[in-house]
Amino acid sequence: MTVFILCFLMFLVGIHGVLTRRNLIKVVISLTVMEFSIFLMLALIGYISGGEAPILGRDMVFGQPVVDPLPQAMVLTAIVIALATNAMLLTIAIRLYKKYGTFDIRRINELKG
Amino acid sequence: MLSVIIGFMIIAAIVAIHAKDLLSAIIAQGFVGYGLVICFLMLKAPDLAIVQIVVETITLIIMVAVVLDSSRKELEVSFDRRQAGTIAASFLFIMVLLLYFNRAISGLNHFGGHSLRMSEAYVTGAASQTGALNLVTGVLWDFRGYDTLGEATVLFTAAIGVITIIRLVGKK
Amino acid sequence: MSVIVKKIAQLMSGLIFVYGIYIITHGHLTPGGGFAGGALVAGAFILLILANGSEYIKLKRQEEGSSVVESAAVLMALVLATAGLVAGSLVFFNNYLPEGIPGQLISAGTIPLYNIFIGTEVAAALITIFLALVIYKEEISK
């Protein structure tokens, strides 16, 4: 169970970064750390100790109990969606820099237009 | 062994959000990503390891390009009352979340004791019903095809959105 | 970049491209599939562009080629999914091609076809995002 608590600690580090950092790129990095902790949590839940990877051999029988394939399919979808989200966030960040000249969210809030 | 690697990832994440130079923060985030690849390999998930390693490399390349095109340094945090209030609120939030998380995971089985209650039909029926030897691909394209179609749509929308936002002329 | 980097990048990108296509087409037999293989193929092209500099591809200033490939691949995947409505039982997204012997390359119904189309789409989408954010950064003024 300590693995679950360590994984949640990484999520909390990410939330602390999103709430307290003033630089836009730091916010994007903290959001990515939060997403990684969710992927790790899903893969940890589906693990069976002593199990093997969910690929069958030619003889189509499982010698040992197999790891759950359903959370792995969900994490595969989530990784690609996280890549799409990161690309959009970085695009908006670079457009904000080109218009306001800074990445600081407080000065962007004061400049405004 | 898994706890040691997750511990290294937590230390790298703390370095990434406190670094003074943006390029150091991006390298520390790469550390977290590649540590996740090792965790996936230890949790017997080779599909996820392949996807995570290439996606992480491409994300790092794009981030470095964005940072080098603009400014590299983080402006120094003037520790005024507003910043102190934000940090205090964040710690309070973290304490409340930890309390509820302890209560939430008492209902889970212990680590490694998953019960395969929902995937029983997928594991025993995948090879005979779909004909695929790779169970994750069979689940992804045959039993759960709609989720994969939605994911392809999200990636397509992101590519179109990036072209639209970055090449359109704003008003001066 | 220097001559050594350019020559090694040319050799390595060919190997990475072939490996990516192998991972895409054997998606139902070994770990991999459409998304992993597509990202690898995009990685081969990105390596070539990064090693040769941005004057290598600045012939036209728009990402037309990769956008067209990406749209066509997603359209073909949707056509394949809708064809299950007319052939076989009337269910959208059905696996209607014959199953074959598990373990051979041509087996498992429509899964290899889906993997190829989605692999092409993911590769083209990643190349489009990379070109828009890293190489072509100017705004198009009409």
Image (tube, grey):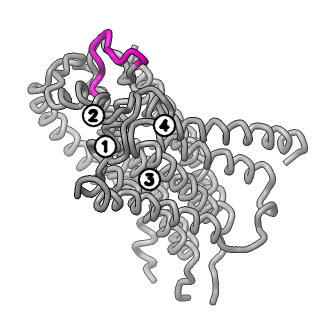
**Label 2 marks which chain's residue?**
B
Q: Establish whether labels 1 and 4 are both on one chain.
A: no
Secondary structure under tag 1 reads helix
Q: Which mark is residue C106?
A: 4
- Residue B171 in the image: above or below residue A94: below
Q: Which mark is residue B142?
A: 1
- The CA span between labels 1 and 2 is 9 Å
Task: Tell me what residue is drawn at x 31 percent, y 57 percent.
Answer: C87
- Residue B129 in the image: above or below residue C40: above
Task: Tell me what residue is drawn at x 57 percent, y 83 percent.
Answer: B169
- Residue type, mark 1 in image: Asp
Report if residue A60 lies within the magenta region.
Answer: yes
Across and down, in percent, residue B61 comes to 61, 48
Label 3 belongs to which residue? A28
Q: Nearer the viewer, mark 4 or mark 3?
A: 4
Q: Nearer the viewer, mark 3 or mark 2?
A: 2
- The CA span between labels 4 and 3 is 43 Å
Across and down, in percent, residue C126 comes to 56, 55
Q: Which mark is residue B129?
A: 2
